[in-house]
Amino acid sequence: AAKLSGRGRSVVFDPAMRAAAVERRRLEQELSEALAADQFRLVYQPVVDLADERVVGFEALLRWQSPTLGAVPPMTFVPVAEDLGLIGDIGAWVLREACRTAAQWRREPGSEDLTMAVNVSAVQLTSPDLIDHVRAALAASGLPATGLVLEVTETALVGNAERAAQSLSALRDLGVRLALDDFGTGYSSLGYLQQFTVDVLKIDRSFVATITGDDEMPPIVRGLIDLGRALDLEIVAEGVESEAQRARLQTGRCDRAQGYLFARPLEATDAELLLLGRFPGVPASELPRA
Ligand code: C2E
Ligand code: MG
Ligand code: MG
Ligand code: MG
């Protein structure tokens, strides 16, 4: 950002800052047209039960393909969409699309209890529209509320804790399940667990990455799992990339896992084939990348 050096003085841009500002302006312009132009899609990463490695759910992850900027990652455009006031409409679209897909996949034999996880940003969580969007997406798709998991980060709870708490309890009243995403990376994690009732704890992949080779379970991962169990939460490990990590987590009584070891986020058609056990003979770890 430009350094404002007091009233009446000029704002000084160096060339790099100017270039960054131009780029940001372009991103904003493109992003404000993206929803109407149908440039978003969802990809789906399987969540597996560590006991038997069955696919028990998916996490929907948003993708934006801009005709001029190419593929822009959500870490880049979600904060911009929040700043521009676009996240409400985009998030409503994500909810509708994810619920519609989940309801469809649940009609397959053996997939009746499939869950669909959807990420909800800080701005969404503190908006009074969220609950209406969730209700509408469930009603339109026929997905029961218990089939939907909303993932919030600790950081989303920080700014406006009171509003966030109201939203979360209204969502729980609907029957929707709540997950604390990237757990352990925000601050005051334990305080939030005390203050907000959630159903699922997702252990951030930075902790999972500390599980290496044949070592003992790293004490922090051990502690996170024990904490989750003590609170009777379902525990999901994120970013599982190695067989050693899978084995440790399984014997360490972690319930579920996601990660490149099992599958990368998949296009809807590929995710459905995987679910049906009909993905053409490729180990999950080599499935195409979405
Ligand atoms: P997240 O919810 O923590 O999602 C997990 C991220 O880790 C995803 O990145 C996923 O592709 C990546 N990932 C999964 N398994 C592995 C693995 O084994 N190794 C590694 N290195 N990475 C793995 P992605 O799709 O780029 O999403 C990034 C973040 O953007 C998400 O983090 C979430 O916070 C946000 N996001 C994604 N979709 C949405 C959305 O629809 N709405 C909102 N508000 N935020 C979203
Ligand atoms: Mg997530
Ligand atoms: Mg996460
Ligand atoms: Mg994460």
Image (cartoon, grey):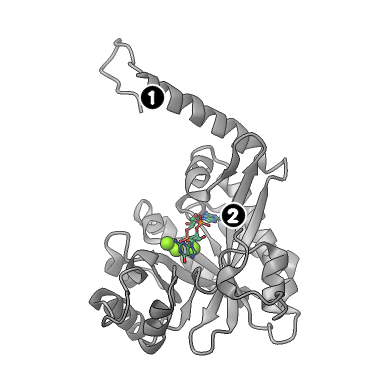
- Mark 1 residue CB less than 8 A from any atom of ligand 1: no
Q: Earlier in the sequence, mark 1 or mark 2?
A: 1
Q: Residues within 10 Å of mark 1 (few under 14, many from 20)?
A: few
For the question of whether residue 232 can be seen, the reply is: no
Q: Which residue is mark 2?
A: 62
Q: Residue at 68% of width from left, 82% of height from top? A: 111
Q: Secondary structure at mark 1?
A: helix
Residue at 74% across, 64% down: 140
- Cβ–Cβ under 8 Å for marks 1 and 2: no
Decide: few, some or many residues near mark 2? Use Cα within 10 Å; few <14, some 14-19, many ≥20. some
Residue on which disc 1 sits? 17
Q: Amino acid at mark 2?
A: Leu
Amino acid carrying label 1: it is Met
Q: At numbered mark 2, what does the secondary structure look like: helix, strand or loop?
A: strand
Q: Is residue 279 left or right of residue 122?
A: right
Would you say 213 lies left or right of 55 here? Answer: left
Residue at 45% in and 53% down: 122
* Quadrant of res 175: bottom right
Q: Relative to 51, does residue 289 appear above or below in the rendering?
A: above
Could you tell whether 116 is left or right of 226 in the image? Answer: right
The verdict on label 2 being within 8 Å of ligand 1 is yes
In the picture, which quadrant includes the N terminus?
top left
Ligand 3 - quadrant of the structure image: bottom left
Distance from the alpha carbon under mark 1 to that under mark 2: 29 Å
In this view, 49 is above or below 207: below
Residue 202 visible? The answer is yes
